[in-house]
Image (cartoon, rainbow, N blue to C red):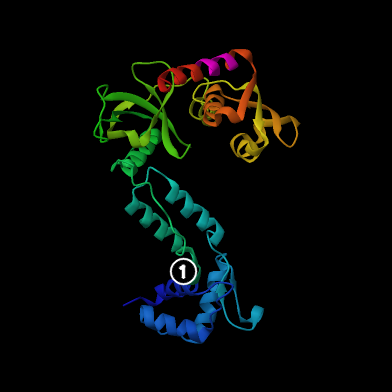
Amino acid sequence: MISQKATILCLYEVLKKYSDENHIISAGKIQEKLKAIYDVDMERRTIYRNIDALRSMGIDIEGYTDNREGYYLIDRAFEPSEIRLLCDAVAASDMIKEENCREIIRKLIDTQSVFQGRMLQKTVFVKNKRKVWNKQLFYNIDTLNIAINQGCKVEVNLLEYDVDTELVKSMDSPIVISPYVTIWALGNYYILAKPEDGEALTHYRIDYLSDIVILERNADMIFGGINPGQYAEHYIYRNGENAERYDVECDRALWQTLIETFGNDLTVMKSDHEKVLVKIYCIPSVMREWVLAHGSRCEVIAPKYFRDEIQRAVMDAYKKYWR
């Protein structure tokens, strides 16, 4: 039996689940929902009084005097478009198992009305079936955050793939690290830390860790502070490489792909209906992958050392395949 004091929460849940700007609910319908779902009998005057109480707490509810129809909850933690974006991000993550993915998406959708939820559920989320999942992922995240907040070192096992495509303990395990901050980059969670037997900061994929134990030893101090954004930009996104300038001539048909790949790092130097000459600032590995992927449809003009490097790569491939 729900206590009288708790019935206001039942009213709030009815408004949250069964009302939005396109589905206004009358006081009579609210009474029906309260009775059917919670077995609560609430008089209309009590409904009005409870809605005023919810408003006094800062909850935005439109009422009959505003629209001449009834009530609906305006104030929500997330808009439907924001929930859609979050659901897509969860579904796209390679680190989250399919069953965990479905559960998280369900919780996100539950923040909306049932009508908005039905629209969101029409989206098809596709997971990568080839991924080998680390069952300890969420435990890892929680444990590392506890260790960071307590300023403690942790002992961890490093994982790697064996030839049977299973995640197994690395020969270097276990190691002791001082964890400082978690970083989300390139669709993965990383822990920025310093190994006990080293001086330099490094990062580890959290889904490549297991059996984390918090130690009763203080984490090593870092002098000069840490800028996680700058670290991620240089060591994760750029893999420790520095950006350089490249002049590349491409077929005009590659223009859309150029923009999608390099975006604001690209400047057009010359173009016509057949060719486009561009100046690109990026790291060498990205440019190398781009040029080799598009073969005869693009040409590195400068710098010369990089042009020579591509020439050697093409010749090595030629020797392997032209026999």
Q: Secondary structure at mark 1?
A: helix
Is 272 included in the stretch rendered in magenta? no
| Quarter occupied by the N terminus | bottom left
In terms of image quadrants, where is residue 298? top right
Which amino acid, by three-letter code, is at mark 1?
A: Arg
Q: Which residue is mark 1?
A: 118
**Which residue corresponds to the image point at 40% horizontal and 60% vertical from the top-left?**
106
Residue at 46% across, 64% down: 122
Can see residue 79? no
Residue 23: image quadrant is bottom right
Q: Main secondary structure of the magenta part?
A: helix
Q: Is residue 277 above or below residue 33?
A: above
Please give the name of the residue rendered at 46% of the width and 69% of the height, measured from the top-left corner.
118
Could you classify mark 1 by the number of other residues whose Cα lies within 10 Å: few (under 14), some (14-19), or many (20 or more)?
Answer: few
The location of residue 21, given as percent across then percent down, is: 59, 72
**Does residue 201 appear to the left or right of 61 in the view shown?**
left
Q: Is residue 309 magenta?
A: yes
> Where does the magenta region start and end?
307-312
Q: Is residue 217 left or right of residue 46?
A: left
Residue 96 visible in this rendered orientation of the protein? yes
Residue situated in front as seen by the camera: 283 or 207: 283
Position of 39 with respect to 238 (left or right) is left
Q: Quadrant of the C terminus?
A: top left
